[in-house]
Image (spheres, grey):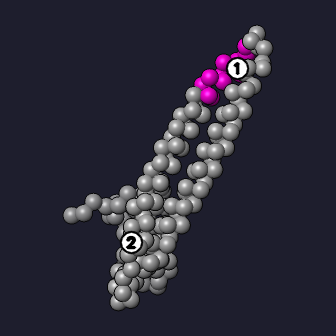
Amino acid sequence: MPEEPCQCPDCQRFYREHDRLIRENPTLRQQQELNWAALQSFRTLAGRVLEELQKSQGDGEAEPATAPPAAASPASAAAPAEEDNLQQAIGDLENINAHLFSIEALMERIFDVRVPEDVEQKFREVAGELAPDPLNADRLRLNRLLHQTPDLPDHRP
């Protein structure tokens, strides 16, 4: 017997998004384009944030050199911890960008694949089975029945 899907809010949000992406992009070509756009937007945003953090780190390094050494305060005691956190974040973002670049190289190979229209139609059929329209009358009726059944694990009295 398969394990029941997790019912926590994060997982439920993931399942809804997963199904929505299948419903709205039910062909191989649409999935390729969707994933390429998501990858590129992730790289663009992560790259820009990395640049901004590196700039602010460069600006932050010049400030302590001009500050008088006797200006030790509780705020300046927290500065090394903040600097360590910033360094860690920059290192993590550099790693993310390297991984995204590797994924992009793999995605280029996937993006080159083309399939005939009858195979795209099979994608549409399977998408309808995997992620049926949640507003479909039959689906709504089934959901209403399931939520009225007290012996289901996700039923909350």
Residue visible at 49% across and 66% down in the picture: 36
Q: Residues within 10 Å of mark 2 (few under 14, many from 20)?
A: some
Res 156 seen here: no
78 or 32: which is nearer to us? 32
Question: Any mark on residue 76, and which?
Answer: 1
Which stretch did the figure color magenta?
72-83
- Magenta segment: does it hold 79? yes
Q: Residue at x 78, y 20 (%)?
A: 66
The quadrant of the image that shows the C terminus is bottom left
Can residue 139 be found in the magenta stretch? no
Nearer the observer, disc 1 or disc 2?
1
Q: What kind of residue is marked 2?
A: Leu
Look at label 1 and name its amino acid: Ser
Distance from disc 1 to disc 2, alpha carbons, whole Å, reads 58 Å
Q: Which residue is pictured at 38% across the width and 89% down the height? A: 117
Q: Position of residue 2 (x, y in %)?
A: 25, 63
Res. 146 mark: 2
Q: Is residue 96 left or right of residue 49?
A: left
Q: Residues within 10 Å of mark 1 (few under 14, many from 20)?
A: few
